[in-house]
Image (cartoon, coloured by chain):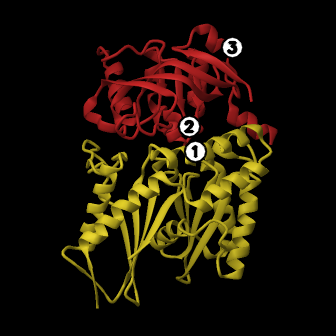
Chain colours: A yellow, B red
């Protein structure tokens, strides 16, 4: 057994929260630069140039990339040989979120009650935490800053299996066509296919963690990702919806076995300010 | 890229000259308000109560900034999704607000209301909150401090970049771009 102190987890999570909010990952920044070179719309090129300038300024001055510093979505991959000492793992994560958001001058955006909406928790807790247990003695934490603008434009559909792959494509394209302009494009499109309603959604969100340009290891899915990226970029929505060929930077699809009667599909849109960081403890 | 420099609050003449697709640099004052403040203000307007500040002629910026780090006027301060404020547009226009800045498409009803009341909806750089904070030179809480990040602020801006999405004549940039493509 390997012991990891809850305090260590809190400190690492606090660092991740701040780092994720100030620094746009290299793969996203490079994809924005490539898009700027290839974009044919004048407004689109202007917007992309400003988004790149924003990322450079945020990194230099340690400012949040976006004022929506998100709901903290934390994916934990916990080695079965790890024991957390001196506190519980979810508590340690939330303590880290509170510390990171407070010390990093990040916005507290979480309301304690979704219907009464009268009290902000004040420190952006609780985080949304997903824990997966795997063999080994490592603790991997992926911290995703998920803004509401793009999260609100996401959805899940329970298709009839007869609709098949064409139904899946139609659903994804119509979702992006209807809602993409509101989700701060260019988008990272996370897709989950299979499992159950909630698993498809979780897969779609997990798909957002995959680096831009890294294709699925399944050949058929990889081809589907490429095809959908081309089709999405033919919609002409463009950067911030002002027209252009850069509507998405990536389509990442994760799949899971599913029931003979089901074909769940979830689309989780990620905005261009695609903020996530990882730590391995 | 051509930018038209304009002063906020906007004169009727300024509004009459702007067309969907025009890029502008806004200088002057804006009122920062988003969801919770819109709900409270719109209730006060409907009940005929006195507002804590004047809305007549003002420009509303849909923003909830991050807390200012030491030595800065404001934290990151980009636009939030405008369509969530659609249900409050009628009361805001009735109370005299004429300019609105946010991001993303809105309902056809909003476009009609702007045309009817002669108001303009601008989009600015969604997700570029760090950069946009540089155009904000001053900030003052003018209502609802208890709302925290949703408190109403008066902002002083210089050369704040935005693009006309719905003009006062029914023009719609998103529709225009869809037609061209």
Q: Is residue A241 visible?
A: no
Residue A202 appears left or right of B103: left
Q: What mark, if any, has residue A52 been given in the picture?
A: none
Q: Position of residue B152 (x, y in %)?
A: 35, 27
Q: Secondary structure at mark 2?
A: loop
Q: Secondary structure at mark 1?
A: helix
Q: Position of residue B113 (x, y in %)?
A: 56, 22
Residue, x 36% and y 45% (percent of image)?
Answer: A107
Residue, x 75% and y 40% (percent of image)?
Answer: B178
Mark pair 1, 2: CA separation:
7 Å
- Considering depth in this image, is B104 or B25 the residue closer to the camera? B25
User: Which of the chains bears the disc numbered 3?
Assistant: B
Residue picked out by circle 3 = B17
Of the 4 image quadrants, the one containing the C terminus of chain B is: top right
Residue picked out by circle 2 = B103
Mark pair 1, 3: CA separation:
27 Å
Residue A194 appears left or right of B51: right
Crowding around mark 1 (Cα neighbors within 10 Å: few <14, some 14 to 19, many 20+) is many
Q: What mark, if any, has residue A182 been given in the picture?
A: 1
Of the 4 image quadrants, the one containing the N terminus of chain B is: top right
- Considering depth in this image, is A200 or A37 the residue closer to the camera? A37
Q: Quarter-wise, where is residue A158 in the image? A: bottom right
Residue A213 appears left or right of A234: left
Q: Quarter-wise, where is residue A17 in the image? A: bottom left
Do labels 3 and 2 touch, CB within 8 Å? no
Q: Farthest left residue? A: A86
Do labels 1 and 2 touch, CB within 8 Å? yes
Q: Position of residue A134 (x, y in %)?
A: 41, 86
Crowding around mark 3 (Cα neighbors within 10 Å: few <14, some 14 to 19, many 20+) is few
- Considering depth in this image, is B140 or A159 the residue closer to the camera? B140
Q: Position of residue A36 (x, y in %)?
A: 73, 48
Crowding around mark 2 (Cα neighbors within 10 Å: few <14, some 14 to 19, many 20+) is many
């Amino acid at each position: 057994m390997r012991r990891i102190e809850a305090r260590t987890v809190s400190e690492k999570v606090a660092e991740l929260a701040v780092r994720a909010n100030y620094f746009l990952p290299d793969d996203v920044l490079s994809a924005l630069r490539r898009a700027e070179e290839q974009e044919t719309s004048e407004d689109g090129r202007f917007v992309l140039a400003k988004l790149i300038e924003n990322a450079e300024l945020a990194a230099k001055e340690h400012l949040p990339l976006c004022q929506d510093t998100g709901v903290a979505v934390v994916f934990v991959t916990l080695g079965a040989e790890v024991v957390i000492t001196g506190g519980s793992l979810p508590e340690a994560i939330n303590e880290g979120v509170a510390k990171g958001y407070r010390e990093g001058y990040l916005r507290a955006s979480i309301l304690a009650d979704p219907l009464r909406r009268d009290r902000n928790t004040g420190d952006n807790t609780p985080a949304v935490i997903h824990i997966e247990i795997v063999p080994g003695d490592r603790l991997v934490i992926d911290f995703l800053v998920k803004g509401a603008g793009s999260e609100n434009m996401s959805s899940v559909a329970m298709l009839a299996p007869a609709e098949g792959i064409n139904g899946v494509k139609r659903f994804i394209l119509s979702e992006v066509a209807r809602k993409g302009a509101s989700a701060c494009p260019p988008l990272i499109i996370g897709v989950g296919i299979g499992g159950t309603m909630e698993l498809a959604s979780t897969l779609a969100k997990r798909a957002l963690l995959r680096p831009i340009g890294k294709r699925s290891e399944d050949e058929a899915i990889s081809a589907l990702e490429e095809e959908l990226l081309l089709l999405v970029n033919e919609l002409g929505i463009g950067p911030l919806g002002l027209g252009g060929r850069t509507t998405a930077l990536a389509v990442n699809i994760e799949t899971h076995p599913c029931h003979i009667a089901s074909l769940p599909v979830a689309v989780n849109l990620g905005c261009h300010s695609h903020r996530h960081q990882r730590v391995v403890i | 890229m051509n930018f038209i420099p304009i002063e906020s609050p906007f004169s009727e003449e300024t509004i009459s000259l702007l067309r969907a697709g025009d890029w502008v640099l806004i200088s002057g004052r804006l009122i920062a308000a988003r969801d919770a403040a819109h709900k409270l203000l719109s209730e006060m307007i409907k009940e005929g109560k006195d507002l804590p500040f004047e809305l007549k002629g003002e420009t509303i910026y849909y923003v909830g900034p991050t807390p200012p780090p030491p030595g800065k006027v404001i934290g990151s301060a980009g636009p939030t999704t405008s369509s969530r404020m659609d249900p409050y547009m009628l009361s805001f226009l009735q109370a005299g607000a004429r300019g609105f800045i946010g991001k993303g498409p809105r309902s056809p009803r909003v476009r009609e209301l702007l045309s009817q009341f002669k108001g303009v909806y601008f989009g600015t750089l969604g997700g570029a909150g760090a950069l946009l904070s540089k155009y904000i030179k001053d900030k003052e809480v003018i209502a609802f401090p208890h709302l925290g990040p949703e408190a109403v602020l008066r902002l002083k801006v210089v050369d704040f970049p935005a693009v006309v999405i719905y003009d006062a004549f029914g023009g719609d940039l998103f529709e225009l771009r869809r037609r061209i493509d």
